[in-house]
Amino acid sequence: MSHINKSKPLSSLLDNYFAALGMSDKLYTARIVNNWSDIVGPAVSKYTLEIFVQKGLLYVKINSPALKQELNYIKDEIKNKINEYLNKTFIKGLVIY
């Protein structure tokens, strides 16, 4: 008798579980916040004061005017990097303030 192995990665199972509970947005937000330094690097992370997600937009508070201006030029690159990190299109845009 042959058994078909239909195993899925644990991350996929957890994503489905949290989605069923209506908590997937909170999970993705937590992953962004907890891994912010890995996603954008320690130089940007050092000047980040606050991060939160609201209606698909990632809000990032930066305490350096020069860095804030620089990040505004590469918002799409950061958005793509985050979505790639999550392996899902979760962030629709960034607001750097």
Image (cartoon, helix red, strand yellow):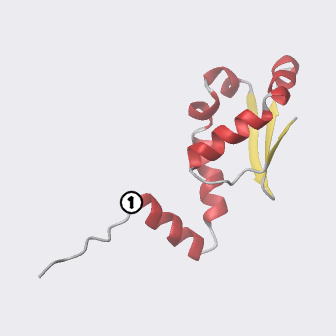
Look at the image and tell me in which quarter the C terminus lies. top right
* Farthest left residue in view: 1
Of the pair 72 and 2, the residue shown nearer to us: 2
Query: Is disc 1 surrounded by few (<14), some (14 to 19) or many (20+) residues within 10 Å?
Result: few
16 left or right of 79 in image: left
Instruction: Give the image location of residue 70, x and y in percent.
Output: 82, 21
Provide residue 53's location: percent of width, then percent of height. 76, 52
Q: Tell whether 6 sits left or right of 67.
A: left
Give the quadrant of residue 71: top right
Q: Position of residue 12 (x, y in %)?
A: 46, 62
Residue visible at 59% across and 58% down? Answer: 27
Residue 85 falls in image quadrant? top right
Task: Identify the element where label 1 is drawn.
Answer: loop
- For image coordinates 62% across by 36% down, the residue present is 36
Give the answer, above or below, for where 95 lies relative to 47: below
Identify whether 19 is placed above or below 28: below
Q: Which residue is mark 1?
A: 9
Residue lying at the far front of the rendered structure: 2
The residue under the point 68% across, 24% down is 46
**Quadrant of residue 55 within the rendered picture:** bottom right
| Farthest top residue in view | 66
Q: Could you say which is closer to the camera, residue 27 or residue 63?
A: 27
Amino acid under disc 1: Pro
Total labels: the figure holds 1
Quadrant in which the N terminus appears: bottom left
